[in-house]
Amino acid sequence: MLDLTLNWKPNPDTLAKLLTLANQQQKPLETLLDEAVLQYFQVQEQEILSVEDDPIVGLYSGSPDLSTRHEY
């Protein structure tokens, strides 16, 4: 496994939250960060629906100015 050293200067609030979470889960900070990066990749790899496959597209078909053209 590659051993990598980063020059990372996290926001102090972010670091405090990470350290608290690592302590609560009794995991090393490195493990917590590795899990977070893997989860980020999973989210990025999720297939984005095309307009044709999106179930909400077309749900409200009609003129966008319909509310201003209503009859009294």
Image (cartoon, rainbow, N blue to C red):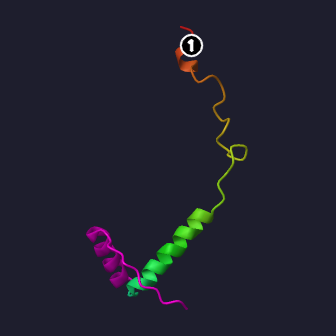
Image-based side of 5 in relation to 50, left or right: left
Q: Please, what secondary structure does the residue beneath circle 1 have?
A: loop
Q: Residue at x 64, y 54 (%)?
A: 48
* Residue 39 x/y as whole percent: 53, 71
Question: What amino acid type should be assigned to the residue bearing mark 1?
Answer: Arg
* Residue 26 x/y as whole percent: 38, 87
Q: Nearer the viewer, residue 33 or 72?
A: 33
Q: Quadrant of the N terminus?
A: bottom right
Q: Residue at x 32, y 69 (%)?
A: 14
Residue 3 is covered by the magenta coloring? yes
* Residue 55 x/y as whole percent: 68, 45
Residue 14 is covered by the magenta coloring? yes
Q: Quadrant of residue 30?
A: bottom left
Q: Which residues are magenta?
A: 1-25
Vertical position of residue 64 compared to residue 41: above or below:
above
Q: Nearer the viewer, residue 39 or 67?
A: 39
Determine which residue is flagged by label 1.
69
Vertical position of residue 64 compared to residue 10: above or below:
above
Q: Residue at x 43, y 80 (%)?
A: 32
Image-based side of 15 in relation to 45, left or right: left
Q: Quadrant of residue 60?
A: top right
